[in-house]
């Protein structure tokens, strides 16, 4: 039986993929959720991956549409004879989390749910039912001002609303040891259950050959060795600042200061005009950063502009290595370049991943980081790894 997991955006799918990859599994991400049945069956003649990740790209959808998208993927998977191993959610509970959880619970009416958004490695914990980011209640952090998903409450049950029934277990999680303990506790119960949570929870979901079983811990697993980056050319890395999160902006400035990366700002009225200047920077052997002006406009327009600029650069330069902050940005780029599948390569650090895929212009090595992940030097470390 094929195995798969679901995520609501590409960076989340890669984050969860990293957890499974470290345990020795070959992980592939289906960028187009509509083709999940084909990806599970590998009708193109290729070998099926040990585990398939599927991004529904529902993070910013209305709840009704997001639920319908999840239901459609689950129905396609059932037809393909696939087993759901894990449902990835945002560790700060952004997006229509409750609606997607309800869709999963409706599809598995006999199952309980372990709902654990915590990711202690990046400072996301749940304490007394309150979701915290590096010790600060969620609603008191920058996530309260997220332009698309402002978080107005820090209590997990408030965010889930009436979907937080007795079928849903919401544990306090301060450390990864807490995750291990609650998985063991769930395993001791008689009922079947489904794991729903951050990428950290995925580290304790058991995946057997040809069958995935949510609710079986892999507490003693060998760490997978980093794979060599595929033999791409040594052209510099194009860095995309697709997130307005303050930490991401700090990371950008550190890369400029420590590696001499050149900043190129997009003009919303003519986003592709910056392409020639970026290509020149890359030809000089420097890292190039493409980003948006400080005063943002409509997020949809911003995403469209940054995607147009990056595609124009890729069409006029030989660069094959791209680093994107923000799952939406990475997904839009894949969509524009016709990337249907990504083969997981490695996790640079928690949540910061590398994947390879075939695009309409050749092979692409894609680095992806969620906006709020990492520390001040995360971009520097990602750049150093991708330019090796």
Image (cartoon, rainbow, N blue to C red):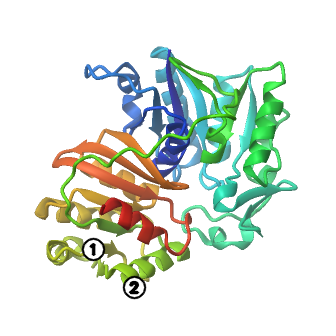
Q: Earlier in the sequence, mark 1 or mark 2?
A: 2
Q: Residue at x 51, y 28 (%)?
A: 4
Residue at which label 1 appears? 288
Q: Nearer the viewer, residue 280 or 170?
A: 280
Residue 388, position as x, y percentages in the image: 30, 61
Residue at which label 2 appears? 257
User: In the figure, is residue 91 to the left or right of 294?
Assistant: right
User: In the figure, is residue 265 to the left or right of 214?
Assistant: left
In the structure shown, which secondary structural element does the residue marked by tag 2 occupy? Answer: helix
Residue 110, position as x, y percentages in the image: 74, 19
Image-quadrant location for residue 368? bottom left
Residue 293 seen from this side: no
Q: Residue at x 82, y 45 (%)?
A: 171
Is residue 353 shown above or below 323?
above
Front: mark 1 or 2: 2
Image-quadrant location for residue 29? top left
Q: Nearer the viewer, residue 361 or 73?
A: 361
Classed neighbour count for the residue bearing mark 1: other residues with Cα under 10 Å, few (<14), some (14–19), many (≥20): many
Q: Residue at x 40, y 27 (%)?
A: 49
In the structure shown, which secondary structural element does the residue marked by tag 1 occupy? Answer: strand
């Amino acid at each position: 039986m094929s195995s798969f997991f679901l995520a609501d955006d590409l960076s989340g799918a890669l984050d969860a993929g990293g957890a499974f990859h470290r345990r020795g599994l070959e992980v592939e991400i289906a960028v187009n959720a509509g083709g999940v049945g084909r990806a599970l069956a590998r009708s193109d003649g290729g070998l099926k991956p040990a585990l398939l990740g599927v991004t529904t790209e529902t993070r910013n959808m209305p709840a009704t549409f997001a639920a319908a998208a999840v239901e459609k993927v689950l129905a396609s998977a059932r037809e393909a004879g696939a087993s759901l191993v894990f449902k990835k959610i945002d560790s700060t509970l952004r997006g229509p989390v409750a609606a997607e959880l309800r869709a999963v619970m409706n599809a598995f009416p006999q199952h309980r749910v372990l709902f654990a958004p915590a990711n202690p490695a990046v400072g996301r914990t749940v304490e007394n039912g309150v979701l915290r980011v590096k010790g600060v209640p969620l609603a008191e952090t920058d996530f309260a001002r997220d332009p698309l998903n402002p978080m107005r409450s820090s209590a997990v049950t408030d965010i889930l609303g009436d979907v937080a029934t007795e079928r849903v277990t919401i544990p306090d999680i301060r450390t990864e040891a807490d995750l291990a303990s609650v998985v063991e506790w769930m395993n001791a119960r008689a009922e079947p259950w489904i794991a729903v949570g951050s990428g950290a929870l995925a580290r304790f979901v058991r995946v057997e050959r040809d069958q995935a079983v949510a609710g079986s811990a892999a507490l003693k697993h060998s760490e997978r060795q980093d794979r060599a980056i595929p033999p791409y050319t040594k052209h510099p890395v194009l860095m995309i600042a697709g997130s307005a999160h303050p930490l991401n902006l700090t990371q950008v400035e550190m890369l400029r200061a420590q590696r001499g990366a050149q900043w190129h700002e997009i003009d919303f009225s003519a986003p592709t005009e910056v392409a020639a200047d970026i290509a020149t920077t890359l030809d000089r052997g420097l890292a190039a950063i493409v980003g948006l002006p400080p005063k943002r406009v409509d997020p949809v327009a911003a995403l469209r502009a940054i995607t147009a600029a990056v595609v124009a650069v890729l069409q006029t330069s030989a660069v094959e290595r791209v680093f994107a902050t923000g799952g939406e940005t990475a997904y839009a780029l894949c969509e524009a370049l016709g990337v249907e599948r990504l083969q997981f390569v490695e996790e640079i650090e928690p949540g910061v991943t590398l994947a390879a895929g075939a695009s309409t212009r050749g092979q692409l090595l894609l680095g992806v980081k969620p906006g709020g992940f990492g520390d001040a030097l995360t971009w520097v470390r990602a750049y150093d790894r991708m330019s090796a």
